[in-house]
Image (tube, grey):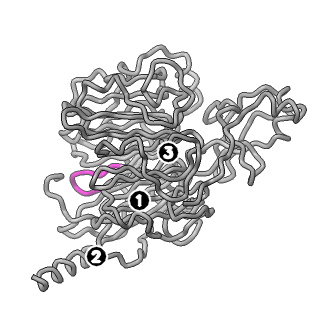
Amino acid sequence: MEEDDRREKEKVKEKAETQRIWSWGAGTDGQLGTGSLQDHTLPQLLRLPSLPSPISSLACGGAHVIALTSGGKVLTWGRGSSGQLGHGDVVSYVLNPKPVTSLDNYFITHGSAGWSHSAFVSDNGRLFTCGDGSFGQLGHGDYTSHCSPFRVSSFVDHFVSQVACGMRHSLVLLKGSSVNQVYGFGSGKRGQLGISRDKIKSICVPEVIRELEDKEIVEIAASGDHSAAISVDGHLHMWGRGFKGVADSHYPQRLISSLRFAKATLGWNHALALTGEGEGFMVGGNHLGVLTDPQSLNSAKQSTVNMKEANLEKIPGLDGVKIVDVVAGAEHSALVTEKREIKTWGWGEHGQLGLGDTCDQTSPLTLSLGCELNEAESIRVFCGSGFTFALTMPYDPSLH
Amino acid sequence: MSYDDVEIEDMEWNEELQAYTYPCPCGDLFQITKEDLKLGEEIARCPSCSLYITVIYNMEDFLDDQNSKKNLEPPKQQAVTVA
């Protein structure tokens, strides 16, 4: 038995050692994990501290990163000026991945990084938040900031399954015995909380989104002043700040479409949605993800188009190749194809497209990680506001 | 080309920078000082990139400090609680 145990541990450790991770884009607060504050226009292979288990997912925020390991541990780095790194202190930045030791007693399965706050969900359904709380986005019933993760007491009697952090707000998905419920808290000025048709400045105690109560929500997303949720039947619900040519919505509206969506990801002026068939679509933005120009922002103000009537544009230039994952940064986007290629497009001023320059791109272009993936690996991408990460994972045949 | 129009009440006073700030999509902060506002400047710039925003505010609110405290209540920077 002990021998088996030891072998299993070695296997996991080996996976951790063979895992590769790259970053590129804005490095102004050490968010690239390269040990410096430099921007990089090409993917940088990181030298991570030796981990007992491989990284299973990343959450990238305004200028900080949360890494979760397959063993349920948490590491963070990047900007820490609001306590968002959860290390128990306020620091300008942390250049290298550092464990969040106060969560060591929990097995963390899910994390989300907002502009300057962070949230963590444990396998037993507990929610912890830290960082900037000045808009109520930590959900602790006050407007205080915290530099260590604190359990959100509103949900002590509930099982939290997901959390999504936007610029100044948070969404929480509860797994219920009969129905899943979505809660919102933090800034609500643009309607991003979805809790009331009236204007709400901010709330610091989580409130349920009644409009979603009869929908079985399986996934939530938040970024900038936008919010989204996907129901089990593949319907995409959006609320908050309007996109190009679309008015703000203070309550969730189901996008009118015959498509069935499996994933939604939000930027500051665009949303991306992926269907179960591997087709990608975009709402808002200017030229498909490139920085929104003032012309379109002005027209957005005059627009009367309702969020449910938002126009979906198909992500171009894929020639029928299926998309397995898609992620939005603030003003850029990245996707992974079934051929395990990473493509990026949008705003490129900080090198966040990883194409070796600082140009904007209106159509997805393939980037090079500088090495081949082996057959046992698949690749995942994660976008922060102005930066991007790629991570090798054990090959998952269900995705290809 | 202004990235966005932002009301002063949505900006945060940053003691360290001595400026009103708002998140920039590059990860840094758009910044404008009280002195700039007093002069009628309405552009807040990001020190790390080419983007800037247009600040919507009432110049009179900044002409004398006494007034600015009365009329403006930007979200105060909260003390961070050490656990």
Question: Mark 2 or 3, which is nearer the eye?
Answer: 3
Instruction: Give the left or right position of residue A233, taking residue A43 as reference.
Output: left
Give A153 or A113, whichever is nearer the viewer.
A153
Magenta span contains residue A143: no
Query: Where is B34 relative to A112, above or below?
Result: above
Q: Mark 2 belongs to which amino acid?
A: Thr
Instruction: Please state the horizontal and vertical placement of residue A255, each as a whole percent of the image.
Output: 32, 24
- Residue most extreme to the left: A1
Instruction: Please state the horizontal and vertical placement of residue A136, each as a whole percent of the image.
Output: 54, 39
Residue occupied by mark 1: A389
Give B26 or A140, whichever is nearer the viewer.
A140
Letter of the chain that mark 3 sits on in the rendering: A
Question: Mark 1 or 3, which is nearer the eye?
Answer: 3
Residue occupied by mark 2: A18
Whether labels 2 and 1 belong to a single chain: the reply is yes
Residue occupied by mark 3: A138
Chain-order first, disc 2 or disc 1: 2
Q: Mark 1 belongs to which amino acid?
A: Phe
Question: Residue drawn 35% across and 20% down?
Answer: A308
| Distance Cα–Cα, label 2 vs label 1 | 17 Å
